[in-house]
Each structure stands twice: as structure tokens, then as C-alpha cells.
Amino acid sequence: MPFDRTIKIAPSILSADFADFGREIRAIEAQGADWVHVDVMDGHFVPNLTFGPPAVKAFRPHVKTVMDVHLMIAPVDPYIEAFADAGSDLITAHVEAGPHIHRTLQAIRATGVKAGIALNPGTPAEAVEPLLDLVDMVLVMTVNPGFGGQSFLDMTAKIARIRAMIGDRPVHIQVDGGITPQTAPLVAAAGADVLVAGSAVFKGGSVATPEPYGANIAAIRDAATRA
Ligand code: DX5
Ligand code: ZN
């Protein structure tokens, strides 16, 4: 995973066909996805349930790019090893998920997996300032996590502040929630380089007709790159 700040599109498989993850993952990668974003929800930290480590492990052989695992779970520490063993390339935990975030980030890095820190829309940029030397990515949520298809909350000022705090550290800024060709230029101009999109990537396509995935990915990438 060499570091660069070019725009990367990470489709969220939360919007895929849940009976066909292997083919969906291969389809989005063939259609230009840079990373594959896996949304893990526990019905406690967020009001929805999705995947555990065995499902993530089953996705692994299908992912040829980067398996980017977003943990929306609390507590998070007891599950880090299992998600690392499942083959995650990057594990992101929420700063709101527990009282000892340094321990969480150290635990992720101790497994050899890259570490991300996520902030809910209501959490200020300053919450990540003491953590920037412990992470490979900051995820600025642009919706309250829990569901795909919600509308974008404007976090551009927060993204710009975090981009300035990062300076020349090799730390990505990811955004997640409500990303479309309309909102992508706003977050890219503010400093985000990894754009998660669920509904805006999967809409109009299927494993049988995957070309719309490619057009949707290209439209988001082009809009962000022009910003
Ligand atoms: C939100 C999830 C997102 C979500 C994005 O809780 O973390 O990854 O799937 O979905 P869209 O792009 O549809 O807003
Ligand atoms: Zn996510």
C-alpha cells in the first residue's frame, strides 16, 4: 500500500447484493474501484447490524486491491485481532467507541494492519490531533453512521482543519456518507483523498450488468479530480 494523495474511490459493499458478495467485489474492482470498503455494524454503536469476522474473511480472497474495514462497533478492542486475522489491510475504529483510543490504535498496529481513526459528524477535528502519529488514515464521517443512502452533511471545514493538522505526514483523509459526483468536489477540494461511496456506485448496475458501476466510479473520480 504505497502512500499517495491521488483520489481513490472505495465502494461500500453495504450497497451490494448481500447474496453475492464475491461477484460484487470482483465486479467493482474490474470497474475501477481502488479500495473495497467494508462497513461493520454492531446494533449498539450504530442502529444496524452487518458483518462479523467470518464474513470479512470470506470476502478476503475476492479483494485484490485494499480491504478497508470500518468498524462501527463498541467495544472495539476485543475484536481487533479477529478482524486482522480475517485479512483486513486497514482497520478503522471510531474515536467515540471507547475511552482508551491510544490503546485501540496501538492494538490495531500491533497486528501489522494499518490503522484509521473515524470521527462522527458531531465530533470536532481537535479529537484527532493527539492521534496523528498513530494512524494511517482519518475518516471524517459525512453522515451519522448506520445506514447507506443518507444525505451528505457538509464537513468541509473539518476536513480542511484536519488536512492542515496532518501536514506532510503520510496520513490519508477518507470521507464516508452521501458521496456523489455533486458532493465529491467539495470534500476533495477540502483535502480528502479516499472517497467511500455506496449507493452512488451501485445504483443502476448489478453483477450481470456491471458497466454502470464503472460509469458511477468514473463520474465520482472525475468530479473529485477536477476540484
Ligand atoms: C455509513 C457507512 C457508509 C455507507 C455509505 O454508516 O459507513 O459506508 O455505506 O453509503 P452511501 O454512499 O450510500 O451514503
Ligand atoms: Zn463506512
Image (cartoon, grey):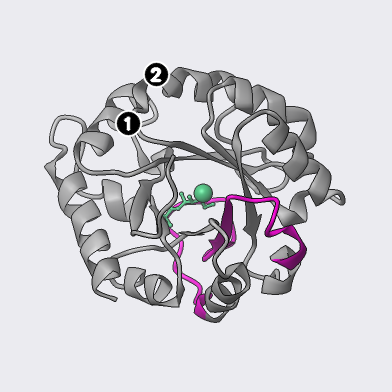
Q: Which residue matches tag 2?
A: 61
Label 1 SS: helix
Q: Is any part of residue 124 visible from this angle?
A: no
| Residue 8 on image: x %, y % | 35, 53
Q: Residues within 10 Å of mark 1 (few under 14, many from 20)?
A: many
Residue under the image location 72 percent in, 32 percent down: 110
Q: Residues within 10 Å of mark 2 (few under 14, many from 20)?
A: few
Q: Which mark is residue 25?
A: 1
Disc 1/disc 2 C-alpha distance (Å): 10 Å
Which quarter of the picture shows residue 184?
Answer: bottom left
- Left or right relative to 217: residue 61: right
Magenta segment range? 129-156
| Camera-side residue of 100 and 47 | 100
| Residue 220 on image: x %, y % | 26, 61
Residue under the image location 56 percent in, 30 percent down: 51
Label 2 SS: helix
For the N terminus, the image quarter is top left
Give, as a three-letter code, the residue at label 2: Pro
CB at mark 2 closer than 8 A to ligand 2? no
Residue 96 lies in magenta, yes or no?
Answer: no
Look at discs 1 and 2 and give the one toward the viewer. Answer: 2
